[in-house]
C-alpha cells in the first residue's frame, strides 16, 4: 500500500490563481481530512469527509472547496489564491474503529507558496 | 482551542528515556489521549493512544494518571531519529468529537 499520497509536493501560485491539491489513499479509508500548517504552528483542520458524497467544514474552511466523489480521492480546491494561504497542507485518512475512527494516517504534505 | 498543555521544548541524551508530559485537565470521560510526532515538517506520525489504562507498543509507552488529567509519553531509549515535535491530543471517538486538534507540541531534541 502506498498509504496517503499528496500531489504536488511543492507549488508556487500567483495571487488570484486557482488550483487543486490532490489527495489519494489506497487503504479504503472512509474518513479523509485536510489540514494546513503555518510556520511554528500546529495543524488546523480545513475540511473533512466521512465518506463518499459527504463533506463538512473544519476550523478554517474559508477560501477552500472540497468534494468526495470516490472513497479514494479527496481533492482540495483553492478558488482564488491569496498570500495568506501560503502554508503546508496535509491530507489524512482514518478507518472505522470501535464505534468511531482510528488514528489518522497522514500524507507527506504539499508546500504551497502564494506570491 | 487545544485541550492540552505541553512544554515547548525538551532535551534528551541519546540512549536515555525521554519523558514527555502533557496536561489535559478538562478531559471528559469518553475522550482518548493520542500522541503524534512530526519529524522535520513531514506528515504527522501516529505513536500511541489510550483511554485510562497505560499502553505500550513498539514505539513508546503511555502513562495516564488515575484522574486522567495528565499523561506522559515515554520513549524508552531515545535516538537521534526521535528528534521531532511531539503532539499530545485529546480526542473523542465519534462524530465531530473525533476531529484532531493540534496545539504547538513539544520539540524534543535528542543529542549525543
Image (spheres, grey):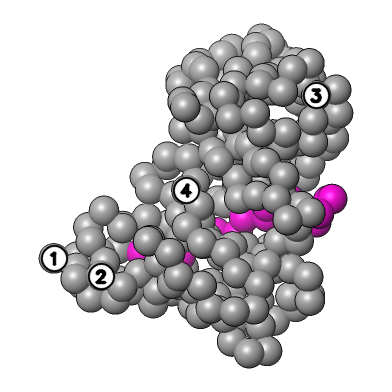
User: Few, some or many C-alpha atoms within 10 Å of disc 2 (few <14, some 14-19, many ≥20)?
Assistant: some
Label 4 near label 1: C-beta < 8 Å?
no
Label 4 near label 3: C-beta < 8 Å?
no
Query: Could one spot residue B98 in this view of the protein?
Result: no
Q: Do tags 1 and 4 sit on the same chain?
A: yes
Label 2 near label 3: C-beta < 8 Å?
no
Mark number, residue B112: 1
Question: To which residue does mark 3 refer?
Answer: A52
Provide the secondary structure element on which disc 4 rests. strand
In the figure, is residue A66 to the left or right of B13?
A: right
Say if B41 sits above or below B50 in the image. above
Label 4 near label 2: C-beta < 8 Å?
no
Which mark is nearer the camera, 2 or 1?
Answer: 2
Provide the secondary structure element on which disc 3 rests. loop
Q: Mark 2 or mark 4: name the one nearer the start of the chain.
A: 4
Q: Do tags 3 and 2 sit on the same chain?
A: no
The residue drawn where x is 66% and y is 33% is A29
Front in this rendered view, residue A13 or A69: A69
Mark number, residue B45: 4
Chain of the residue under label 3: A
In the rendered image, residue B19, in percent from the top left (x then y), is placed at 39, 77
Which region of the structure is painted magenta? B94-108
In the figure, is residue B19 to the left or right of B36?
A: left
User: Few, some or many C-alpha atoms within 10 Å of disc 1 (few <14, some 14-19, many ≥20)?
Assistant: few
Question: To which residue does mark 2 refer?
Answer: B77
Mark pair 1, 3: CA separation = 48 Å
Provide the secondary structure element on which disc 1 rests. loop
Mark pair 3, 2: CA separation = 42 Å
Furthest residue in direction front, as rendered: A98
Mark pair 3, 4: CA separation = 25 Å
Amino acid at each position: 500500500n502506498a498509504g496517503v499520497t499528496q500531489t504536488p509536493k511543492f507549488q508556487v501560485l500567483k495571487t488570484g490563481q486557482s488550483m487543486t491539491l490532490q489527495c489519494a489513499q489506497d487503504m479504503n479509508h472512509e474518513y479523509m481530512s485536510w489540514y494546513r500548517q503555518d510556520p511554528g504552528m500546529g495543524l488546523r483542520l480545513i475540511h473533512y469527509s466521512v465518506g463518499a458524497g459527504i463533506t463538512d467544514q473544519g476550523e478554517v474552511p474559508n477560501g477552500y472547496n472540497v468534494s468526495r466523489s470516490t472513497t479514494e480521492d479527496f481533492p482540495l480546491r483553492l478558488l482564488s489564491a491569496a498570500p495568506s494561504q501560503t502554508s503546508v497542507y496535509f491530507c489524512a485518512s482514518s478507518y472505522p474503529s470501535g464505534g468511531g475512527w482510528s488514528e489518522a494516517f497522514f500524507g507527506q504534505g504539499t508546500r504551497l507558496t502564494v506570491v | 482551542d487545544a485541550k492540552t498543555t505541553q512544554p515547548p521544548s525538551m532535551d534528551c541524551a541519546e540512549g536515555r528515556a525521554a519523558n514527555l508530559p502533557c496536561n489535559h485537565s478538562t478531559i471528559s470521560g469518553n475522550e482518548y489521549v493520542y500522541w503524534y510526532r512530526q519529524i522535520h515538517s513531514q506528515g504527522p506520525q501516529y505513536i500511541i493512544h489510550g483511554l485510562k489504562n497505560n499502553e505500550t507498543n513498539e514505539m513508546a509507552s503511555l502513562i495516564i494518571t488515575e484522574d486522567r488529567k495528565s499523561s506522559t509519553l515515554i520513549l524508552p531509549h531515545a535516538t537521534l531519529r526521535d528528534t521531532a515535535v511531539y503532539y499530545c491530543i485529546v480526542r473523542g471517538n465519534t462524530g465531530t468529537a473525533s476531529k484532531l486538534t493540534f496545539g504547538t507540541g513539544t520539540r524534543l531534541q535528542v543529542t549525543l
